[in-house]
Image: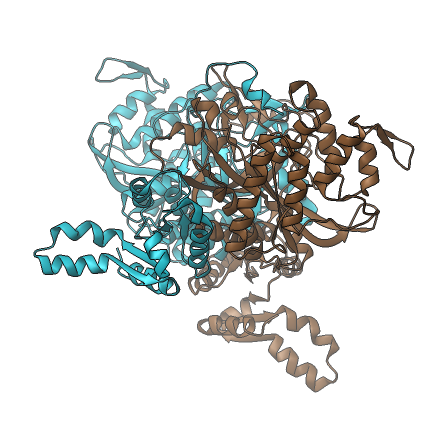
Chain colours: A cyan, B brown
Amino acid sequence: MTNETQHDKPKSLPDAKLPRGFADRDALDVAATERMLAKIRETYVLYGFDVLETPFIEFTEALGKFLPDLDRPNEGVFSFKDDDDQWLSLRYDLTAPLARHVAENFDKLPKPFRSMRSGWVFRNEKPGPGRFRQFMQCDADIVGAGSVAADAEMAMLMADTLEAVGIARGDYQIKVNNRKVLDGVMEAIGLAGDDNAGRRLTVLRAIDKLDKFPADEIRKLLGPGRKDESGDFTKGAGLDAEAIERVIQFTGWGDQGAGAQSPVGNVALTLANFRSAVAGSERGEQGCQELATMAGLFEAAGYDNSRIVIDPSVVRGLEYYTGPVFEAELTFAVKGDDGRPVRFGSVAGGGRYDGLVSRFRGEPVPATGFSIGVSRLLAALRLLGKIDDQAATAPVVVLVMDRDQIAHYQKLVTLLRQDGLRAELYLGDSGMKAQMKYADRRGARCVVIQGSDERERGEVLIKDLVLGATLSSAPDREAYLKAQAEAQFAVSETAMLDGVRKVLARGA
Amino acid sequence: MTNETQHDKPKSLPDAKLPRGFADRDALDVAATERMLAKIRETYVLYGFDVLETPFIEFTEALGKFLPDLDRPNEGVFSFKDDDDQWLSLRYDLTAPLARHVAENFDKLPKPFRSMRSGWVFRNEKPGPGRFRQFMQCDADIVGAGSVAADAEMAMLMADTLEAVGIARGDYQIKVNNRKVLDGVMEAIGLAGDDNAGRRLTVLRAIDKLDKFPADEIRKLLGPGRKDESGDFTKGAGLDAEAIERVIQFTGWGDQGAGAQSPVGNVALTLANFRSAVAGSERGEQGCQELATMAGLFEAAGYDNSRIVIDPSVVRGLEYYTGPVFEAELTFAVKGDDGRPVRFGSVAGGGRYDGLVSRFRGEPVPATGFSIGVSRLLAALRLLGKIDDQAATAPVVVLVMDRDQIAHYQKLVTLLRQDGLRAELYLGDSGMKAQMKYADRRGARCVVIQGSDERERGEVLIKDLVLGATLSSAPDREAYLKAQAEAQFAVSETAMLDGVRKVLARGA
C-alpha cells in the first residue's frame, strides 16, 4: 500500500508552473470581479434578461468557426477528440453556445428570447501582456427580434451597465455603426463580391486607423500604400481617387488636418455623409435608415450624443455581424505604449448576427447582442480608483503554547467561531516567534495566548498586534505603560469573547 | 462581403446538441447553486480560509495523475497538446492545481496555508444518470500542517458547512477513518507490499460493502468469494480464517445478524477494535493514536458522535490519502434503485494527502483537505425542500401596438427601468395576441398598452394578467365589473409608474 505512482522510479521533479496565457487569481481579484459582475447582472436583469449557463465543452461542429475578429485565425480554439472520434472544443465565446442552446430548445423558449451569460472562454492563441488564453466575458443577447429596436436596446444597456459599475458619464462612449452601410460603400466603390474580400479587408483596416492617422495618411492606405516613419511599406487597397474620396466622405473626416478630432457626434451630419457615400446601393440605404431609426430611439429614451454616437470608425468584426454593430469605448486617457496619452479603449462590443442560429435551422433567426471583456473592464475600474478591495476580515489567531493542550485551544477557537468571529488555531509545528509571524502574515489584529500560568488562573492573554507595534514610539514611560496595558491584557476565559471584540473594535 | 463561411456550399445542418455528460443550467439552478456556495464560503471564511482561483488548464505533468478514486482510470482526463508539443489537461479536481500553486509560490505563502476554491472540474469518463463530465466542487485545504488537529478542523468544518447550507443535525454524519489503521490491518494479515496491491483492493471493496451486506457475506468476500442471488460469482481476497476475523474485528461488525446497525458511535469500542486489529503494526498503532487525538479534539470542541464518528467503513480513496480520511454522509432516506429506502449517501470527502505538494519539491509538505460535490449537495437540499427557488422578478412588458410609435414605447420602458422596475419592450414582429402570449410566458404580472385612442388622450392602459385570468369566475355581474375595472384600467402617462406599482403590489 505504498504510494507507487510517486516512488516507483526517481524522476526529475515536475515544474510547478502554469502554461503561458493562464494565471491564478487571488481572493481580492475574485471578490472585485464578483462584485462588478453582480452590478452588471443587475442591470441586465432590469432589461429583462435571464441567466443561462452553458458548459465549457461543445461539439466543435456545433460551435462552428465564427470567431468574430478578422485578425484571428479560425484555428485559435482548444480542441480534442472524444472517445467516439468526434471533435470537441472549449467554448471560445458565449455566443456560439447560445446559438446551439436556442436551436436545441427553439420551441420551448419565449421569443424574442433575452439571455445573459457570464463565464470563462478560451482562445488557443499566442498570449501576450494582458492577453490571456482564458478570459471572462459577460454577454447579453436577444434572439428572435429582427427589429433595430432590439439593437438600440443593446446600445442603451451597454451605457447603463458601464454607469452601473462606476464609469462616469463622459468617461465612456457607445459607438454604433452598421455593416450594411459599409457594404453599401463597398458596392459603391466596386468592391462587392467574394473576389474582393481581401481588398475590402484592407479598406476596413484603413478606416480602423482613423483615430491614429490624419485623413491624408488614410488616403494613402486606401490608395497605393503608405510608408511609415521607419520606412516600412504597407500595401494599400488600390482604390482610385473617386473611390478614396467616397470612403473619406463616409468617415466624415474630410480634409481636416492631422490630429483633428473625430467629427462624430453630429448625427444628422454623419447620416448625411453615410447617405452620400452609399448613394446607389439599396443595402447601404437600408443601413442608413436603420441607423436613423436607432438614433430616434436613443433620443426618445434620453440617451444623448455624449453617451451613444453613430461612428463610422467602428469596423472591427464587421465580417461577422450582419447589421448594426456597437462598441463601448472608455474615453479617459491612459499612458500609451509610447508614453503619450491614449484613450483606454474598447471594453465591450457586439452587433446583429442573424446567421448564427439559422445555421442550425435553415431558416432565418435574427439575433443581436454584445459581450463585455470582464478583466479589461475591471482593469479600467482599477485605474479609475473605483475598486474598493475588501479582503475577508483578518482572522483571530489562537496560538499553541503547549502541544498537549491542543484540544483546549481548539475549544477556544470554536467559541470564537460560534460567536461569528473568523478564527484560526495555529496548526504548524513552530514556536512562539514563528507563530507571531504567522499571525502577522495573516493580517491578524489580535492573538489569543494561553501558557501554563494563564491556564492555572483560568485566563487567556489577548494581544493587540497593531497597538503592540506602536509601543516603542510612546513619548514617555507613563504613556508606554498605558499603551502596553491596552496592547496586552489578561482576561478570564469566559471574558475572552468580550476581550477580543474590544480589540477588534479599535479598528484599523 | 457576403457571409461566405455559411453560404459557400449547402451542407447538411449541424446538430444542435451537447456532447454526452454536459448540460445547460437555467437561471433557477444557477441562482440556487450561487446561494448555496455563498453559505459554504461564508463558513470556510469563518475558519480562516481564503479564496484562490486557478485556471481550468494546466500542464498535464503538473496535475499528475492522482485521481483519488480507486475505480477510475488515470486516463479519465481531457488532454490536448499545446503548440510547443507539451501536453495540457483540463483540471480534474481542485487539489492538484492547489499543489501546483503552493509549490510555485511556496516562499510567499503564510504556512500553514488555508485555501478554499470552488469551480468546475472535468472528467473524461463514461457519463450516466446524474454523472456528468463537467461538475462543480468546493474545496477547503490546509497545506503545511502535519498535526492531526488540522484534520480535525476539516471534519468539524464539514459538519458546520452542512448545517450552514440547511442540513439539520441528525441528517448527516461526518465519518472519519485513517489510512494508517488500514495499512496496519493489511500488515497484520500479511498483505503489505506492492505485490499485494490487488488483494488489498479486494479487501477494501469488501469493507466498503458493510452497509449493504451482513458480516457473513463480507466474510465470503474476504475469503474464497461470494455468489450473489443471480448466481454471479465475485472472487474473494482469499484470506485465511484468522485474517478474515481480524478484518471483521477491525470493522466492529462481529457476529451481528444481517441488517444489523453499524456499531460505530462508541468511540472507545471502535478504537479498541482498531487496536486489536492492528496489533503488532507500528504504523497501525500510530493511526489509532491519531484517531484518538482527533476524537479528543471533537469532544473538546463539542462535536459529539451524532455529528462526527470514527467509522471503519470509510475506505474509498484510501490508496490516495496518507493519514486521516473523512466523508460527509447524508443519512436521511431516499428511494434506492430497487425502490427500497437507502441513505442519501456521500456529498463530500477528503483526507490527508502528504504526497501531493512534495512531488514538486522533493521534501515533505503535509496537507489535508476535502471537497464538496456541489451538484450532489444541491440535489440533497432539493429533496429536503430547502431550496427556495427565487427567479428574477418577472418583467413588465410594454406592448407595441403601432410600429411607427416604437420610440415612444421605448421611452415608456426606459421610465419603468429608471424607476427600478424590470421592464421589456416587446421586440418581435407579431400582433396583439402573440404579444399577450409572450407576456404570459415571461410570467409578467402586467402589461402596458397604448393604442392610438390612448395616445390621443395621453394615457396608457395597464392590464393585470393575473386578475384578468380570474374574471370568468366572478359570481355575478357586479363582481365581474368591479374585477374588470381593477384588471384593466387607463391612467395618464405620468401616472404609469404608480399604476404599474399598484398592480405589482397585488402580489402573486
Which quadrant: the C terminus of chain B?
bottom right
Whether residue A95 is visible to the viewer of this picture, yes or no, is yes
Q: In the shown orientation, is residue B471 left or right of residue A500? A: right
Nearest the viewer among A437 and B275 is: B275
Above or below residue A165? Residue B142 is above
Q: Position of residue A197 (x, y in %)?
A: 47, 21
Where residue A380 sits in the image (x, y, percent)? Answer: 32, 42
Front-most of B432 and B377? B377
B212 w.r.t. B411: above or below: above
Identity of the residue furthest to the left in this view = A476
Please state which of residues B339 and A463 is positioned toward the viewer in this rendering.
A463
| Figure quadrant of residue A125 | top left
Q: Measuring from the top left, give residue A66's x and y in whole percent.
A: 54, 29
Q: Quadrant of residue B395?
A: bottom right
Look at 34% across and 22% down and name the residue there. A222
Above or below: residue B472 compared with residue B217: below
Let me know if residue A191 appears in the view: no
Q: Which residue lies furthest to the bottom in this view?
A: B478
- Count of numbered tags: 0
Question: Along the line of sight, which residue is nearer the eye, B111 or A399?
Answer: A399
Give the image location of residue A263, x and y in percent: 28, 40
Q: Say left or right for B114 vs A93.
A: left
